[in-house]
Image (cartoon, rainbow, N blue to C red):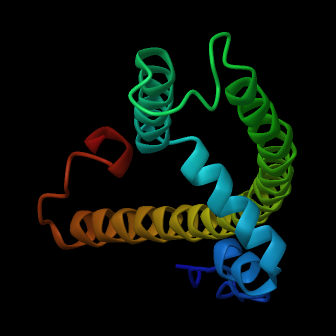
Amino acid sequence: MTKPRFPKPFKHDHPPVQNVNQIIATQLTFGQKASDWVAMNLGSWWFIIIQTIILAIWVMVNVTAWLRHWDPYPFIFMNLVLSLQAAYAAPIIMMSQNRQANRDRLEARNDYLINEKSEQEVRAILEHLAAQDAALLEIHQLLAELGAHSGLSAPTSSPQEID
């Protein structure tokens, strides 16, 4: 019987996996954190509900004349306020989206590197399993030969038949 040959142990020579979220969080500037906060809050149901309530109160107060009309119909001042809000909110939200797109690119690159590492490790495991299969086949054949020489009944199945 020949000595079974097994592949050399797999060496993990790659850098450790990094959490992209932690790396990015440590590099955020005040402006980036503020744009994320604005985008998160302007894109929420709470903001829509609160803004709807404020606009409804604005219209009711100016239509019913409970107080002095500071913005009579057609609500030019309200239109100006909403236009200013949109003019400033849109670029801030776009800054946050651009930064999120950069984060997504970094995460995709990190996922690719992790997949490469996993593929190498799976390949090493499969090579080792193939070597174990060959060693088990040799051992099985040796046992069959020994059983035949000693007059004992040899196993009737081979490892391939067990599948």
- Residue at 27 percent across and 70 percent down: it is 149
Q: Is residue 74 above or below residue 109?
A: above
Which percent across, then down, holds residue 93?
77, 46
Relative horizontal placement of residue 4, taking residue 31 as reference (left or right): left
* 99, 76: nearer the viewer: 76
- Residue at 74 percent across and 82 percent down: it is 23
Query: How many marks overall?
Result: 0
Q: Quadrant of residue 35?
A: bottom right
Q: Is residue 8 above or below residue 154?
A: below
Q: Quadrant of residue 110?
A: bottom right
- Residue at 50 percent across and 30 percent down: it is 58
Q: Residue furthest left?
A: 152
Which percent across, then down, holds residue 27?
81, 83
* 16, 103: nearer the viewer: 103
Q: Residue furthest front?
A: 68
Q: Is residue 158 above or below residue 55?
A: below
Which percent across, then down, holds residue 115?
70, 59
Q: Residue furthest top?
A: 74
Q: Quadrant of the C terminus?
A: top left
Q: Is residue 68 above or below residue 162?
A: above
* 124, 90: nearer the viewer: 90
* 131, 122: nearer the viewer: 122
- Residue at 83 percent across and 46 percent down: it is 88
Which percent across, then down, holds residue 120?
72, 66
